Image (tube, grey):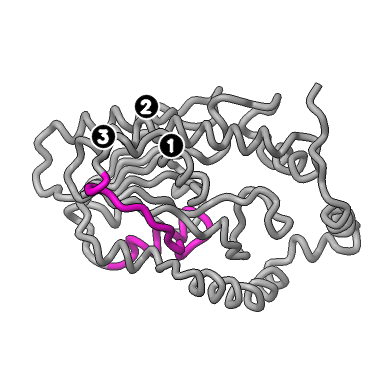
Amino acid sequence: MAQRTRISPLKRLVYKVLSKKPLVYIKKSKKFRKFIASIINPFLHMYIKGKGIPPQLRLLRNVPWRTLIILDACRYDVFREVFTKKFSRAFSETDYSLTPAESPATWTIPWLAEVFGHGDWSDTMYITANPTYTRLGNFNPFEVFGEVVEVWRDYWSEELGTVHPSYVEQAFHEVFNKLNQGIKRYVVHFLQPHYPYLTRTFGYRPEESQVFWRNVRDGLIPLDQVIAAYTENLEIALCYAVKIAMSAPKPVVLTSDHGELFGEFFLFTHNKWIRAPPLVIVPFLLIK
């Protein structure tokens, strides 16, 4: 049986206080969250800017990319470690550069709106495993891109609660090898390393994500094992993302819509309000 994750007394006290009934309205109140965010986020942005981390939007606009690969919920620090150790040798050192970037959003739909909500994308094909736009937010890819390939419609796994990244790579090469008149750019959206994890379920079904993250927060699920599963998810996704990057039209940019939280600021997974650095600092890998 797995041991309980050790949580500092201070964090345990905070979790205990926030679980009390009188404060339930605080946790659920959008107005309160926006108020807190309006105070905290400017300082977080100044901290990130002080580190010399550029805005992701500026980098995307300054690079004439032809292929954009999105890894969903990918932290920069984990990506840097995994890519450097296991995947960087696939490219010459002069052919790529890796830098952190500040994402304009903390979850997928506002990120898509920020990046693709302006300009003409009629020459761009969007190949996606992420169905979030069908139930949340107000972003409709069919009104933005020249063509849309919904990989999730054919390859969603109820057992995994996600789309295996191999199907995303397969879909890209199927459409790329065809004559796509008018298409000059490709956007490929993987779901990994986002939860659920491909290698470990921890005894939870994919639809039990809220229970899963609550038990991670409470120390019932070892945090180091969760981070290991997240890292494994990234490694699997990168196997297929790198295959795309090697054959896709250059320049290729490999980045993420947002990061992930593992207890920083007393928060887990991702949220819509606090722009904590691990949540908005994402990788920006340029392959020439």
The answer to whether residue 222 is left or right of residue 164 is right
Measure the C-alpha gap from mark 2 to mark 1: 21 Å
Residue type of the residue flagged with mark 1: Lys
Which one is in front in this view, the residue at disc 1 or the one at disc 3? 1
- Point out the image quarter for the N terminus: top right
- Front residue (pair 223, 73): 223
Secondary structure category for the residue under label 2: helix
Q: Count neighbours of disc 2 (C-alpha within 10 A) and say few if under 14, some if 14 to 19, many if 20 or more.
A: some
Visible residue check, residue 188: yes
Q: Quickly name the residue at label 1.
A: 85
Dots 2 and 1: beta carbons under 8 Å? no
Q: Can you give x and y, in whole percent of width and height, for residue 23 in the image?
A: 86, 63
Q: Residue at x 21, y 29 (%)?
A: 174
Above-or-below relation of 44 to 225: below
Residue 225 percent across, percent down from the top left: 67, 33
232 above or below 20?
above
Secondary structure of the residue carrying numbered label 3: helix
Residue topped by disc 2: 166
User: Is residue 141 in sight in this rendering?
Assistant: no
Closer to us: mark 2 or mark 1? Answer: 1
Residue 113 placement: quadrant = bottom left
Q: Is residue 166 magenta?
A: no
Q: Disc 3 designates what residue?
A: 172
Callout 3: 10 Å neighbours few (<14), some, many (20+)? many
Which residues are drawn in magenta?
Answer: 93-118
Instruction: Where is residue 196? Give x, y as percent.
Output: 57, 34
Residue type of the residue flagged with mark 3: Phe
